[in-house]
Image (spheres, helix red, strand yellow):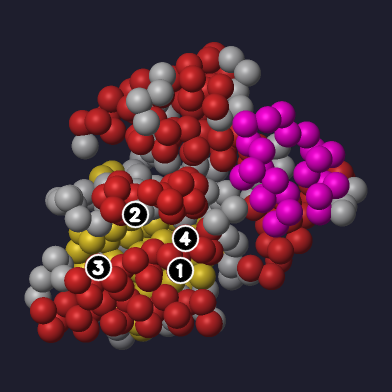
Amino acid sequence: MEHTDIFDAAHTGVGDPNSHRRDYELGAQPLVGLLDRPWYPPYVLDSPHTHNCMEIGVCLYGTGRLGIGGRTWAFREGSVAVVPRDVDHVQNNEGTPLNHWQYVLVNEAAFLEETPARLRGGAREALAGMPGGLFVESGPVADEIRSVVSHMFKRYQACRSLADMTLDGLLRVLMARVLALRSDLGEDIPASAEARRAIEPALQFVSQCYAQEIRMEDLAARCAMSESYFRKVFAAIMGMAPLEYPNRYRINRSVHLLDTTDETVLTIAGMTGFSSIATYNRNFRRYVGKSPAQWRKNAHGR
């Protein structure tokens, strides 16, 4: 079940000025850390925050609400959450004697660097296609991810080192499973994956053609809906107007290009579908809260 009362649902999930950073020390390897976190009542309210790496969490026990990128879900035992680097999130535990999560922390840049060249492009696209994070309430997919995370913690307890071949292999299995959920999709999955299927053709079209002009009629036609009905369905599932989605996708795509390439801001604006540098700068500031040049400068300083 989705809620919108932890923080303003209008937040983009990237660079929210009202959040604060909780950074980790990053090394050269993809696996930053494994955190086993039990909480006991009375629970202290969390506040929106970001990290400098990806956080993959599984709920072992407990209930509460989890906000990622401006959207909020009810979590319970078995839930899985994926929060990319620099995405605002907040977790409020409630109602149980014990609330227990396990987290795998991943350096996305190091993961891409160690990904074989033939697979790197697909992995980078999948990471770029999940700017608002991912939440899986429960079920077979969540169980599979939870099983891999459990094996990682057991292995770490045995070897007491993050620089371990078995842990490295398990991390690649985990990331492959997570990225498979996000390939060809461009935003956060709502609580009901079944409901999302109705608009998946439109989301896939955006992920493939974001650099081109995208019209409402194109999106609606791919979902076999009238424009008026498609607009209502899309807004109900994604929490935004259909034509806002391509802009959000383009901006988040451009964030990754700013971080991972040396292309100029002008070139990136064109690569991600903006007709002018002024339009790109305006949209970038709207969703990220700073200019593309400021973002790149800060990224290089991290």
Q: Nearer the viewer, residue 12 or 117?
A: 117
Looking at this view, is 86 or 117 the one in front?
Answer: 117
Question: How far separated are the C-alphas under marks 1 and 4?
Answer: 6 Å
Whole-percent x, y for residue 17 in the image:
36, 36
Q: CA distance from mark 3 to mark 1?
A: 14 Å
Which sits earlier in the primary sequence, circle 1 or circle 2?
A: 2
Considering the numbered disc 4 on the image, is that residue within a helix, a strand or a loop? helix
Residue displayed at 82% across by 46% down: 220
Query: For the residue marked with disc 4, what is the amino acid?
Result: Leu
Badge 1: residue crowd in 10 Å (few <14, some 14–19, many ≥20) = some
Give the foreground label among 1 and 2.
2
| Label 3: element kind | helix
- Magenta-tinted stretch: 200-223
Which residue occupies the foreground of this view, 39 or 105? 105
Q: Main secondary structure of the magenta part?
A: helix
Estimate the x, y position of residue 278 in percent, counting from the top left.
54, 14
- Mark 1 and mark 2: span between their CA atoms? 14 Å
- Residue 78 vs 124, above or below: the answer is below
Residue 177 numbered mark, or none: 1
Residue that numbered label 3 is attached to:
168
x then y, percent, for residue 56: 35, 64
Is label 4 or label 3 in front? Answer: 3
Amino acid type at circle 1 is: Arg
